[in-house]
Image (spheres, grey):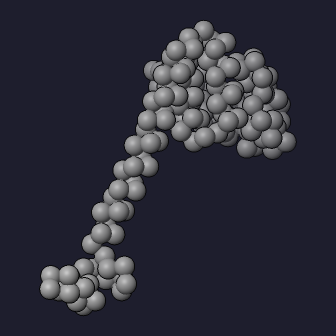
Amino acid sequence: MSLEDELDAILEKGVGKSADDMIKFIEKAYGEVPYIFQFMQDHPELLVTKMLHNNAILRSSSLDPKTIELISIAVGAALRCSHCLKLHIRVASNMGVPDDQIAAVIFLAGNLVNASILATATRHLDEEMDICRTCQMGIGACEIQADEDKSKED
């Protein structure tokens, strides 16, 4: 369905009825209604715009549903969102994604999170090595550090 078709249907049905239909579609697609969509059900304009956004992303992609679920699992793992993880693991399993593929994306996400932590922290460490802990000035401009370095040489 194109964006124009979606918008026409929303205008024809109204936001409230469109939101109800979207909830039914989500439940059919996922086998349940994720919490965030349940919450948005009380705010149909938020639900409708969220679904329009989601659908626009999916329309612009050639990713298949199983790949999308694997990406969702990896992102949920990286963000440490247990709700997202549980839902997307169940959905992927229901789609027939094997456990070894689910485990692989979780491990990949863990590796990326680990690498991100190390890369960020070591960059900060490198930057701080060039700063005097006493005066917070660059080592070259700091008289305190220069005096300490001279006393070490003596």
Q: Quadrant of the N terminus?
A: top right
As rendered, which of 117 and 15 lies closer to the eye? Answer: 117
Image position of 102 (left or right of 41): left
Q: Is residue 120 above or below residue 40?
A: below
Q: Extreme front residue here?
A: 154
Q: Is residue 57 above or below residue 63?
A: below
Q: Quadrant of the C terminus?
A: bottom left
Q: In this rendering, does residue 3 appear at all?
A: no
Question: In which image quadrant can residue 62 be found?
Answer: top left
x and y percent of residue 98 in the render? 56, 11
Image position of 59 (left or right of 115): right
What's the residue at 61%, 17% (across, down)? 92
Image position of 87 (left or right of 140): right
What's the residue at 55%, 20% (across, down)? 102
As rendered, which of 93 and 3 lies closer to the eye? Answer: 93
As rendered, which of 61 and 35 lies closer to the eye? Answer: 35
Q: In this rendering, does residue 73 appear at all?
A: yes
x and y percent of residue 141 in the render? 23, 86
x and y percent of residue 140 in the render? 20, 81
x and y percent of residue 39 in the render? 80, 41
